[in-house]
Image: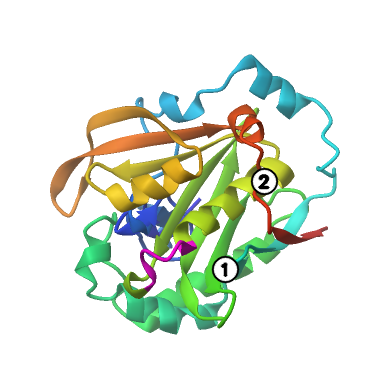
């Protein structure tokens, strides 16, 4: 999955596609999406020899994946809209580039946690989002396993940032990435958005685990993940280079059985899932 804009940082985490780069671990995000297919997949559970903690799963989790679940359908998902009490996740659009660029360009509190230095122009970001949309539509039926959502404030429709889910493997593992604009930090949007994305991965994508990578020191993003039940699986030293520096990372994981045991999904969720 190409994450543009977040590596769990600043208020960012994970890697999702749709933006040229986001940070890790803070409300700017967990590793996020990237438009460049050659960019290292920071935030992906499948990176390098140190990725195993994100793949941790129990025998029960495997059984949940292979068994039949009433909440799941054999029809492939083509799109989704997820609503919480304060936050809405809906498919990314090229027109989101204007708001996203204003939140990312030159914003060091976010960029310090990302794998890249942000988009150079609104047009670059718009092309990346447009490419993401077109490639998603062009995928053969049943193969879509990567989803990039725009986050919106439910009350106002304001663009908050992006969050993405990438599901790979068998049993399925989900890779989470997100970033959030500075002026929306500390208001619970990131926590709810991650909860919505996690519920989507477990309920509709047959994921047995969800993981996110966070740069060490990105405490706000770490708290977002921990509030959603993620646990620290490993601290990986000298994991990768960002902005000319070799940096350490936290690996966070949430198993499906843990999520279900906690009584998830949270109340207040409304889902519109389109299937092909």
Q: Is residue 110 left or right of residue 34?
A: left
Q: Kindly identify which residue carries mark 1.
A: 86
Looking at the picture, how far across and down is residue 32, in whole percent?
Answer: 41, 56
Which span of residues is magenta-colored? 184-189
Which quarter of the figure is the C terminus placed in? bottom right
Q: Is residue 60 left or right of residue 39?
A: right
Looking at the picture, how far across and down is residue 222, in whole percent?
Answer: 35, 45
Q: Is residue 268 left or right of residue 227?
A: right
**Which residue is found at the position 29% from the left and 59% from the top?**
10
Q: Residue furthest top?
A: 59
Identify the disc placed on residue 100.
none
Q: Kindly identify which residue carries mark 2.
A: 265
| Neighbours of disc 2 within 10 Å: few (<14), some (14-19), many (20+) | some
Front residue of this view, candidates 261 and 109? 261
- Can residue 41 be seen here? The reply is no
**Which residue is found at the position 82% from the left and 34% from the top?**
69
- Helix or strand or loop: what does disc 1 sit on? loop
Label 2 to label 1: alpha-carbon separation: 16 Å
């Amino acid at each position: 999955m190409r994450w543009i804009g977040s590596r769990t940082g600043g208020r960012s985490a994970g890697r999702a596609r749709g933006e040229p780069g986001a940070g890790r671990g803070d409300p700017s995000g967990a590793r996020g999406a990237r438009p460049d297919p050659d960019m290292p997949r920071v935030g992906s559970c499948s990176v390098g020899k140190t990725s195993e903690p994100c793949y941790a799963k129990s025998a029960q989790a495997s059984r949940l994946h292979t068994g039949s679940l009433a909440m799941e359908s054999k029809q492939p998902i083509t799109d989704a809209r997820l609503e919480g009490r304060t936050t809405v996740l809906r498919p990314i659009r090229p027109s989101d580039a204007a708001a996203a660029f204003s939140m990312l360009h030159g914003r060091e509190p976010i960029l310090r946690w990302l794998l890249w230095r942000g988009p150079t122009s609104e047009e670059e970001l718009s092309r990346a989002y447009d490419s993401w949309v077109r490639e998603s539509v062009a995928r053969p039926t049943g193969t879509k396993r990567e989803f990039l959502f725009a986050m919106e404030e439910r009350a106002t429709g304001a663009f908050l940032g992006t969050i993405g889910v990438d599901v790979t493997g068998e049993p399925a593992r989900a890779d989470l990435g997100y970033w959030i604009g500075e002026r929306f930090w500390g208001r619970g949007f990131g926590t709810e958005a991650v909860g919505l994305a996690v519920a989507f991965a477990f309920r509709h994508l047959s994921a047995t685990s969800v993981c996110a990578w966070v740069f060490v020191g990105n405490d706000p993003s770490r708290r977002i993940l921990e509030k959603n039940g993620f646990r620290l699986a490993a601290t990986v030293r000298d994991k990768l280079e960002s902005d000319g520096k070799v940096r350490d990372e936290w690996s966070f994981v949430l198993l499906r059985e843990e999520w279900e045991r906690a009584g998830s999904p949270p109340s207040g969720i409304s889902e519109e899932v389109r299937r092909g």
